[in-house]
Amino acid sequence: MHEHSLTELSAAIKNKTLSSVEVTQHFLNRIHKHENLNAFLEVHEQQALKQAKWCDNNPESSKDKPLFGVPIAHKDIFCTIDGHTTCASKVLDKFQANYDATVVKKCAHAGMINLGKLNMDEFAMGSTNENSAYGPVANPWNHENCPGGSSGGSASAVSARLAPIATGSDTGGSIRQPASFTGITGIKPTYGRISRYGMIAFASSLDQAGPMTTSVSDAALMLNIMCGYDHNDTTTAQIAVPDFTKNLNNDIKGLTIGIPEEFFGDGLQEDCKLAVEKAIKTYQELGAIIKPIHLPNLSFAIPTYYLLAPIEAASNLARYDGIHYGYRHKDAESLESLYQLSREYGFGKEVKRRILIGTFASSTEYSAAYYKQALIAKKIITNDYKKAFTEVDAILTPTTTSTAFKLNNKDQSPSSLYLSDIYTVSVNLASLPALSIPVGFDHKNLPIGMQLISNRFNEQTILQLGHAYQRATQWHTMYPELYKG
Ligand code: GLN
């Protein structure tokens, strides 16, 4: 069952070859068996089985529900009425949301069953999942490595086939980088495609939800479910949502793929470079036109992102004051000390670092030097992409500079981790859609990912290209031996 695609699972449930209870129980068993991955923060066992039973008893309700009775797991950044929503922070320990995020609601409307909530970096800040207040997550390919972050629980769960699909969120790479580190497929759609309502805010102008799956065709199916205008999020786009599955099989002959030289420089690990170059050859064989291009201002991306994201985070996280939500320190003697103590004990180190950077960089004295400059750089990066898309249909790059980092790496400084986001953050700054798919393994048998970027609201092109690659290759079907059977 855990090797079935979403379409296969849904068809099997609809034609009663499998019951939803059987499928749900199968994934719950796998989750329990592989608890040591620490991918789940909470398993909604009883609730999930109850819903599955309901599906089995009400087959007539499956009409217009494309994934009736099929399980899913949600990153703990999405509010759910069931269980807790913590964003992997102590500040939201035992917090119970009183509404479902739009994404959660849409998945439920499609008939999907929530298995539980997935581990992540606290408030989605990080690249290793080690910033979770509830412990790190292991990479199923090698437990000594991290699954990436911030959607590390989602990536680990899908890679080990503990869930057929998981939701993630991507502010600077948090869907694509963990997808790359764990050998799965992940797409960050165009900013504004998917509602952020009920998705706990990190950096509101960059945050975007997306699916993490085992194939591009499953990702396309999930986008059909997750996308669309929402009056609760005024930044969602009021444009029609196409059927993303429709053109998947179209021939890619004649499509032009741009290869930006700046993404293949010194910092790139040799194994990753070779695997991505091989993928480029595959595209050539499939009839795509390969064209060298330039994105000359890529070097601005990291400083720009690491100013804008913390500035927005500092503002968004002001709401965790010990009064409104979650954690409240017991020893406070005044209002001020209540704020101080609750935030001091509630937030982890990285979150505090970001709040300090963001508060500093947006303060009256420094905002001209930092915030305003960053906004200008964002525009310059966006224009580079705009220009590139007058020449090419899509851009192909490695997703990450290396394969998965070792857990507990004491030599890894925060700034070296920030630098590792070089291939993903510019995409968020330019509000573009981008897909990461597996393209091979390094000499340590850790997965390698490639990124496909397209123009705003043109997810179809990268889905079509990704699907063509997955029809021609087998990488996406591979998952670690330990999790077979
Ligand atoms: N690694 C990046 C950061 O730490 C991206 C996080 C994200 O996309 N949520 O900010």
Image (spheres, grey):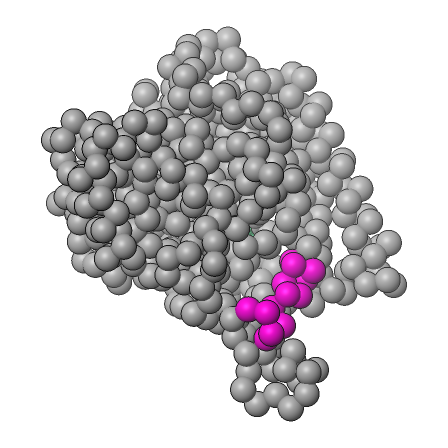
**Quarter of the image holding residue 338?**
bottom right
Looking at the picture, does residue 467 appear above or below residue 110?
Answer: above
Residue range (magenta):
313-325
Q: Nearer the viewer, residue 123 or 192?
A: 192
Residue at screen point 76% across, 35% down = 380
Residue 415, by quadrant, is bottom right
Name the residue located 17 percent from the left edge and 53 percent from the top edge.
29
Q: How many marks?
A: 0
Residue appearing at x 64%, y 65% in the figure: 319
Which quadrant does the C terminus fall into? Answer: top left
Name the spot of residue 267 as percent of width and height, x first: 56, 45
* Membership of 324 in magenta stretch: yes
Residue 349 rendering spot, x and y as whole percentages: 56, 71
Quarter-wise, where is residue 296 in the image? top right
Residue 452 located left or right of residue 141 = right
Question: For this rendering, which residue is in front, 69 or 169?
Answer: 69
Q: Is residue 217 above or below residue 30?
A: above
Nearest to the observer: residue 141 or residue 43: 43
Q: Is any atom of residue 409 visible in this view?
A: no
Magenta stretch: includes residue 172: no
| 434 with respect to 367 (left or right) | left
Seen in the picture, residue 46 relative to 424 is either above or below; the reply is: below
Counting from the top left corner in percent of width and height, residue 363 is at: 81, 63
Taking the spot 52% from the left edge, 75% from the top edge, the residue there is 327
> From the image, which quarter does the N terminus lie in?
top left
In the rendered image, residue 208, in percent from the top left (x then y), is placed at 55, 42
Left-right relation of 442 to 342:
left
For the question of whether residue 14 can be seen, the reply is yes
